[in-house]
Amino acid sequence: MPRPTQVDPRGLRVAAAITSVVLAVALVAPQPVAVTLLALQAAIFAVSAFGGLQYSPYSLFFRRVVRPRLSPPGDLEDSRPPTFAQVVGLAFLLVALAAYAAGAPTLGLVATAFALVAAVLNAAVGLCLGCELYLAGRRLGLGGSATT
Amino acid sequence: MTGLVVLVVALTLSVVLGLLYQRRNGRFRETAPTVPVPAGRPDDAVRLSAQQIGVPLGTEATLVQFSTAFCSPCRATKALLSDVVSRETGVVHVEIDAESHLDLVRELDIMRTPTVLVLDPAGVVVRRASGLPRRDQVLTTLAAVRAGVDLNK
């Protein structure tokens, strides 16, 4: 297996902060705007999850605008846990989008809210809920192909 | 407007969860008395053998760390615990890959990685923490476990 990519954890926190703002606006915006924002955010999750974290526009913003103003990173992080978490985020937004499409806006709000809580926790205290779900999933006999 | 209510609830929940996380993450809690009572350990005390963890038990304490590949704090925990044991005598650190020991993970009810178990010299699990602990939390816990060991010599 190739050596996993290393990422700057501060970039992940910045990306989570931008995600939080987008999802918060999506909760209070009129439905057409909300759906557009959720679709854009879902696309960004998909790019990060399947293309690579470094291709996300949030990551580009961090590298171009934020990082030049910061000192070099003290420690780098394995990219696999946050990549896995992007898949979890994407899943929640797909549920939200499907709910809106099916005419169940309340479910759409709730699914968006779950993704928002995860993003806020990631940005504020560095807790990656998506990563925490990994072992729970394996205990239930799910997944595992990504690392083994 | 429903959206605004949901937003306020979500943000409140985030604050509560965030504070709870910061309070509990890495904190060691007692899983069995450090000092064996005269009548012996309670029946529900969990014991691990050298065979189960793959290395001989430490003469003073053993730090058993459960990790997964999908876990960033595990690396920091490993670095911290390796450093701590290198400065202590009779304390052993072992890292166990949770994914390849799912039976043990279920038996010990490990929900998160890293989870660190502290074993006494007999292999009884006396302390347990999940999340990256701070150095002083590890040292305080080791001192408590050692004190228990000394009382029974």
Image (cartoon, coloured by chain):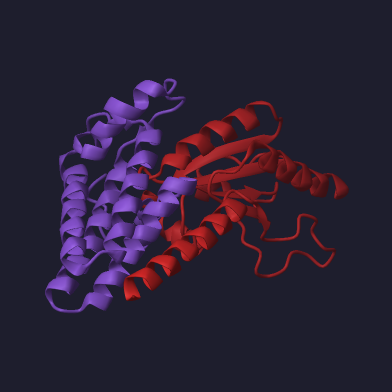
Chain colours: A purple, B red
Inspect this view and state whether residue A44 appears: yes
Q: Residue at x 62, y 36 (%)?
A: B92
| In-image side of A117 versus A104 (left or right) | right
Q: Residue B39: x percent and y percent?
A: 82, 68
- Residue A101 located left or right of residue A96: left
- Number of numbered discs present? 0
Measured as percent of width and height from the top left, residue A61 is found at 27, 33
Q: Which of these two is toward me, A60 or B75?
A: A60
A117 w.r.t. B123: above or below:
below
Q: Quadrant of residue A54?
A: top left
Q: Is residue B54 above or below residue A71?
A: below
In terms of depth relative to the viewer, which is nearer, B113 or B118? B113
Above or below — where is B149 with respect to A60?
below
Q: Quadrant location of residue A101? A: bottom left
Res. B48 in view: no
Residue drawn at the location 31% of the way across and 37% of the way down = A79
- B120 or B19: nearer the viewer: B19
Image point (43%, 67%), residue name: B8
> In the rendered view of the protein, which quadrant contains the N terminus of chain A?
top left
- Left or right: residue B81 versus residue B69 is right
Residue A132 is situated, as x and y percent measured from the top left of the image, at 40, 54
> In the shown orientation, is residue A27 left or right of residue B85?
left
Measured as percent of width and height from the top left, residue B57 is found at: 62, 42
Quadrant where the C terminus of chain A is found in the figure:
top left
Give me the residue at 40% from left, 72% from top.
B5
Residue furthest left in the image: A101
